[in-house]
Image (cartoon, rainbow, N blue to C red):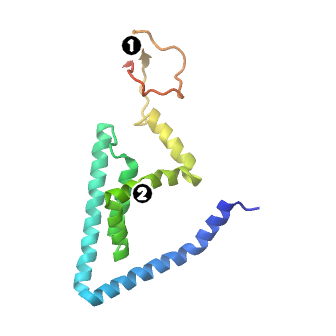
């Protein structure tokens, strides 16, 4: 017996090519209609401007995320960066409907609502276990390197026993690492 998730996934696989074809035809119809109103040269310039704007948005979001990662913090979070990059990619896709959707992703109130979607979508489904594992690995060893050392408490006594990976370290203050 098939579960509801299996039925939904097979329906999506069946109708996805039809949806993509309908989207492409709608974009093409919009481009031709707008070109009939304002001229092909202006339409090409608008599509080129959308591509350049999308590339600029992606570059800015990437540089901002890279600078935040170098400082060790993500002030706006990865979800905000994902929504911004999605908006930039939509701006780069030729067509006016994708440009409108890309611009919507860049409007702060809309972007704030969309921020909840990326991680919620990733945590469910087949990628959920991989995402959770990646988060745990990143929490315990951010750069993947093992640094030999021992934990020393503030009073100078070394910690005894194996490290408890289930405990939370965000209460602070932390001991120092001695090599």
Q: Residue 129, how many percent across, how many down?
A: 57, 46
- Where 41 sits versus 106, above or below? below
Q: Is residue 95 something one can see in this rendering?
A: no
Residue name at image x 23 percent, y 78 percent = 45
Which dot marks residue 154? 1
- Where 44 sits versus 139, above or below? below
Q: Which residue is mark 2?
A: 114
The answer to whether the residues at label 1 and label 2 have Cβ atoms under 8 Å apart is no
For the C terminus, give its image quadrant.
top left
Q: Is residue 37 left or right of residue 135?
A: left
Instruction: Please identify the residue farthest to the front as the structure is shown.
Output: 109
Specify the quadrant of the image occupied by residue 16.
bottom right
Counting other residues with Cα less than 10 Å from the Cα at mark 2, is it few (<14), some (14-19), or many (20 or more)? some
Query: How far is the residue under mark 1 from the one under mark 2?
Result: 43 Å
| Local secondary structure at mark 1 | loop
Q: Residue 31, how many percent across, how many down?
A: 34, 83
| Local secondary structure at mark 2 | helix
Specify the quadrant of the image occupied by residue 89.
bottom left
**In the image shown, does 61 or 110 lie closer to the viewer?**
110
Q: Residue 71, how many percent across, how many down?
A: 29, 38
Residue name at image x 25 percent, y 76 percent = 46
User: Which one is closest to the eye, mark 1 or mark 2?
Assistant: 2
Q: Is residue 118 something one can see in this rendering?
A: yes
Q: Earlier in the sequence, mark 1 or mark 2?
A: 2
Q: Is residue 67 left or right of residue 176?
A: left
Q: Residue 74, how many percent across, how many down?
A: 34, 42
């Amino acid at each position: 017996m098939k579960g509801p998730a299996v039925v939904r996934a097979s329906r999506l696989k069946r109708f996805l090519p039809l949806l993509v074809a309908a989207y492409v035809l709608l974009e093409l119809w919009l481009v031709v209609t707008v070109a009939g109103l304002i001229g092909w040269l202006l339409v090409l310039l608008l599509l080129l401007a959308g591509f350049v704007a999308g590339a600029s948005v992606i570059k800015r979001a990437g540089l901002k995320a890279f600078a935040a990662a170098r400082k060790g913090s993500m002030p706006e979070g990865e979800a905000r960066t994902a929504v911004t990059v999605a908006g930039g990619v939509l701006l780069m896709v030729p067509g006016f409907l994708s440009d409108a959707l890309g611009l919507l992703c860049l409007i702060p109130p809309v972007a704030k609502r969309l921020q909840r979607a990326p991680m919620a979508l990733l945590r469910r489904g087949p990628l959920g276990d991989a995402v959770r594992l990646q988060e745990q690995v990143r929490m315990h060893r951010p750069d993947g390197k093992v640094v030999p050392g021992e934990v020393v408490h503030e009073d100078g006594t070394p910690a005894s026993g194996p490290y408890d990976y289930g405990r939370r370290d965000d209460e602070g203050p932390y001991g120092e690492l001695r090599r």
